[in-house]
Image (cartoon, rainbow, N blue to C red):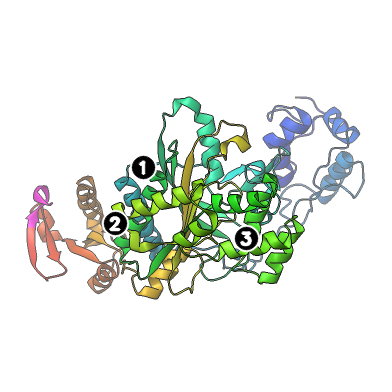
Amino acid sequence: MAANATHLILHPRLNHYFKSSIFLRHHLNLNPSLLLSPSSLSFIRNHKLLIPRFSVSQNPRNCSSSALQALNDNVSGGRSGALSPPPVTETSQKIDVNPPKGTRDFPPEEMRLRSWLFQNFREVSRLFGFEEIDFPVLESEALFIRKAGEEIRDQLYSFEDRGNRRVALRPELTPSLARLVIQKGKSAPLPLKWFAVGQCWRYERMTRGRRREHYQWNMDIIGVPEVTAEAELISSIVTFFKRLGITSSDVGFKVSSRKVLQEVLRSYSIPENLFGKVCIIIDKMEKIPMDEIKSELKSVGMSEKAIEELLEVLSVKSLSKLEEILGTAGDAIADLKQLFSLADKFGYSEWIQFDASVVRGLAYYTGIVFEGFDREGTLRAICGGGRYDRLLSTFGGDDVPACGFGFGDAVIVELLKEKGLLPELSPLVENIVCSLDQELQGAAATVATILREKGQSVDLVLENKPLKWVFKRAARINAGRLILVGNSEWQKGMVRVKILATGEQYEVKLDQLE
């Protein structure tokens, strides 16, 4: 070994830094086993590589302060501007124990409710023959930026990653679905009936049932141009509501068609490219004063006469009245009539009603649109969806007829609370196993393993606890039976079983324990 080599053991923190693979790979291109010779140190200094300066006050061990200072000066050229690591503090700091604003923790009791809700989402999807899919929570920002003016555009959690790419946490699932359909191309035979339950993020003003992160159940049908697809989707939501005990007196669906607006705008020669902007403005009707609605419509180029007629049409709540205004020639009336006819066949006609003001705020909808609402009017929209036949082309794909809906988890929980329909979801464990002697803890583990291999849930008491504690634990986890491993029983190859609901007790051989 060279006499003038500098060993990498001068100081624990310095030694760790020099040996780190990141430093050696990116700055020195050295093997970690190599020593830093004076020439290496000169290389670092000449190339102005920034090395942390280390204090001698933090456990310098056998290294003198003068040696450390000399090495610091040698590496950094004697300058005090070298990069320093974050200060190390020995005192614990108090952190905010609440999750970020608008987000949620899911402790066991909340997680049980979430799992129950998702199980119902999935079961209804299964009943209707849908297959489950999912997508990354992090997507390209461009996937969600379609047209200026959309509320969702201003609600993105978006940023630039380390590869200088613009990315965003997904605010909804439909664009990700469109991306996947384009990616699959003709390898996915139509029609596709897919569903997803995924987390979404929107930086928005929080109200009851509205959070900045939420979970959303989506069902989508790709490749069916007929209104039967929309009718099937609404039927699936009604089925879900019925499973939870919600009736048509609690919830309804407002139904309309984007084609209604198109026909009105066409009659006033409003350019097609303004259609999306008008829809976005109309979707704000229940959120901002009517004067502001009129002002915004005027700003996109609509005349006062066109605005008044449009608002008159949007106030219509009867399909027959709409037919008087628009006539019977357009697609809008035909589609809506067919949907209401199918609703009768599916058996949910009392759940739906026509409301021309429903347009949905997302620019990609093209035909029938619908929203689920609580009839008392205390909550925001429970769910919503519609037809989006031209979404794929906005991402460079070939247009395919498609429709779907999104259903958030937060509003439905609020509704269930209001109606007293939240289930009591206690923890449920089939067995609690406990040894009566510390030396038998291994035997208790054997019993637990036997039961788990038979598919039974087991809470194994991992410490030597008194029976009073064990019974309290059994009640807290709602255990079905208590299995005690005691000396006298174990010597006979048996355990004692207590059925906790009835108090019945018996001994059973280990190989007969079921």
Which of the numbered marks, if any, corresponds to residue 310? 3
Front disc: 2 or 1: 2
Q: Nearer the viewer, residue 167 or 238?
A: 238
Residues under numbered marks 3 and 1 in contact, where contact means CB atoms less than 8 Å apart: no
Earlier along the polypeptide chain: callout 2 or callout 3?
A: 3
Amino acid type, mark 3: Leu
Front disc: 2 or 3: 3
Earlier along the polypeptide chain: callout 3 or callout 1?
A: 1
Question: What is the C-alpha distance between the residues marked 2 and 1?
Answer: 21 Å
Name the residue that disc number 2 marks.
347
Amino acid type, mark 2: Gly
Q: Where residue 431 sits in the image (x, y, percent)?
A: 21, 59
Which of the numbered marks, if any, corresponds to residue 428? none
Quarter of image, res 391? top right
Residues under numbered marks 2 and 1 in contact, where contact means CB atoms less than 8 Å apart: no
Question: Is residue 431 depicted above or below 219 in this figure?
Answer: below
Which of the numbered marks, if any, corresponds to residue 130? 1
